[in-house]
Amino acid sequence: MNIVCANCFTTNRIPDDKDYNNGKCGKCQQAVYSSTPVALGNNTFYPFIERNTLPVIVDFWASWCGPCQNMAPIYNKVAESSPTLLFAKVNTEQVQQIAADANIRSLPTLVFFHQGEEVDRVSGGLNEMQMKQWLVQCVQKMKNT
Ligand SMILES: [Zn+2]
């Protein structure tokens, strides 16, 4: 499988029998996998959502958005406990073009991508249970398409 390094964004090919959660990047030697959400920018957003074999969830947020602030620790916690999913964040104030391309109309919005294709999205603050239920639904939907 392919995994995009959370540190330098180089695509690493990891043999299926190797544990990607503990893999090191061939280029920068840092951990390829991050259990905390990876901040994406203009140059890293598309490579990250398209080249990863694993699904990528992106949290579109802004510093002025109260519900975004409330949801951030929940998002971090769910990321930590979901080793088969990759979690990322886009600061919509800094990365406006990506937010526009993704047609983000309200914050926070979570978008579930699988190899560059949007599987589903949800807007508004979620609690931990709601977030986990949504992720289960997304994985199911992804497997059915
Ligand atoms: Zn790297």
Image (tube, helix red, strand yellow):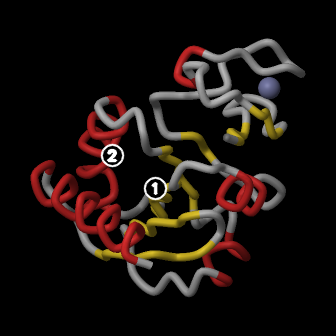
Q: Position of residue 58 (x, y in %)?
A: 50, 59
* Mark 1 CB lies closer than 8 A to ligand 1: no
How far separated are the C-alphas under marks 1 and 2?
A: 11 Å
Q: Quadrant of the C terminus?
A: bottom left
The answer to which image quadrant residue 9 occupies is top right
Q: Ligand 1 falls in which quarter?
A: top right
Mark 1, Cα crowd under 10 Å, few <14 / some 14-19 / many 20+, is few
- Amino acid identity at mark 2: Ala
Residue type at tag 1: Ser
Query: Which residue position is annotated with label 1?
Result: 63
Give the image location of residue 1, x and y in percent.
67, 40
Q: Tell me which residue sits at (59%, 28%) in the image.
A: 33
Query: Is residue 28 or residue 13 the one in the foreground?
Result: 13
Q: How many marks?
A: 2
Label 2 crowd bin: few (<14), some (14–19), many (20+), radius 10 Å: some
Name the element at disc 2.
Answer: helix
Q: Position of residue 31 (x, y in %)?
A: 66, 18
Quadrant in which residue 23 is drawn: top right
